[in-house]
Image (spheres, rainbow, N blue to C red):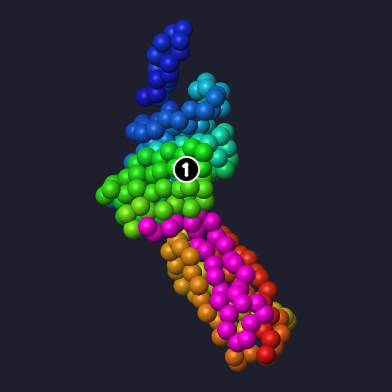
Amino acid sequence: MIVKYSQVYGWSAIPSLTDLPLKKVFSNDDNVWIAGGYLDNQNSNTIFLKSTNNGQTWIQHHTSPYLINDMYFIDNNLGWAVGADTAYRGVILKSTDGGDTWKLVVDSLLGPLNSIFIKDNYGWAAGDYGLVLRTTDAGTTWIDDGNNKTYPTEFELKQNYPNPFNPNTTLSFVIGHLSFVTLKIYDILGKEIATVVSEEKSAGKYEIEFDGSNLSSGIYFYELKTRSYTVTKKMVLLK
């Protein structure tokens, strides 16, 4: 059940919107968000309610397979949520459209996250097993204070170094969350020359050394690809 407070009428009940347990309420001006549901035996039944008129009407969304335990909206569009997946591993979600859709940005944490707070680019998320994550860049990266591990929330392919190179160069990339990743090399005609990476990788920063000793001088391209992200950059081999 949801109850609403008015300075004139005090607390009053709102007609039932769901039978699921509701866990968190967050309000910003006339926008109100409520999250709830449960995880049970690898199944999920979750709900996310949003009102843009101070609770007069509500829109329902589902966040399966992630249960939201807490959320914090910086403004009416940008918001963060923490909770758990169906395996009870901690997750951080991000919304850029006021909670209409959520993107998984950190996953596979030791246990569920239960609370989050962000202000002036600094923030913290805390949960089971003493988990404490912090951010100093408004959620672009999160750092586990227990093991100092960094969890970036975005994907990035960096420029190889050195460039031009002969014959070795370092390819660096950032994985925002657990993803199947391929990193391939192509010649200037688009022919695949080598597959440097083709496997599932967890969130983090990676560096791979590429050996071009068996290639001719020229322009080559390297492409990083995941399910949701593809980017290509140019490198030059000079012998």
Above/below status of 93 relative to 150: above
Is 199 positioned to the left or the right of 113 in the image? Answer: right
Exactly how many numbered labels are in the figure? Answer: 1
Q: Which residues are magenta?
A: 148-176
Local packing at callout 1 (Cα closer than 10 Å; few below 14, some 14-19, many 20+) is few
Q: Position of residue 9 (x, y in %)?
A: 44, 8
Choose between 213 and 43: the one closer to the eye.
213
Hey, which residue is sitting farthest top in the picture? 8
Hey, which residue is sitting farthest left in the picture? 129
Which residue is rendered at x = 35% and y = 48% of the image? 132
Is 204 positioned to the left or the right of 146 in the image? Answer: right
Q: From the image, which quarter does the C terminus lie in? A: bottom right
Q: Which residue is mark 1?
A: 122
Residue 194: quadrant of the picture: bottom right
Q: Position of residue 17 (x, y in %)?
A: 43, 28
Q: Is residue 22 visible?
A: yes
Which residue is rendered at x = 57% and y = 37% of the image? 77
Choose between 231 and 42: the one closer to the eye.
231
Residue 78: quadrant of the picture: top right
Q: Position of residue 202 (x, y in %)?
A: 43, 64
Q: Is residue 42 visible?
A: no
Above/below status of 25 relative to 227: above
Above/below status of 53 relative to 128: above
Which residue is rendered at x = 53% and y = 36% of the image? 74
Instruction: Check residue 157 for magenta coloring.
Output: yes
Q: Position of residue 221 (x, y in %)?
A: 66, 76
* Amino acid, disc 1: Tyr
Q: From the image, which quarter does the N terminus lie in? A: top left
Choose between 224 and 52: the one closer to the eye.
224
Which residue is rendered at x = 52% and y = 79% of the image? 209
Secondary structure category for the residue under label 1? strand
Instruction: Check residue 11 for magenta coloring.
Output: no
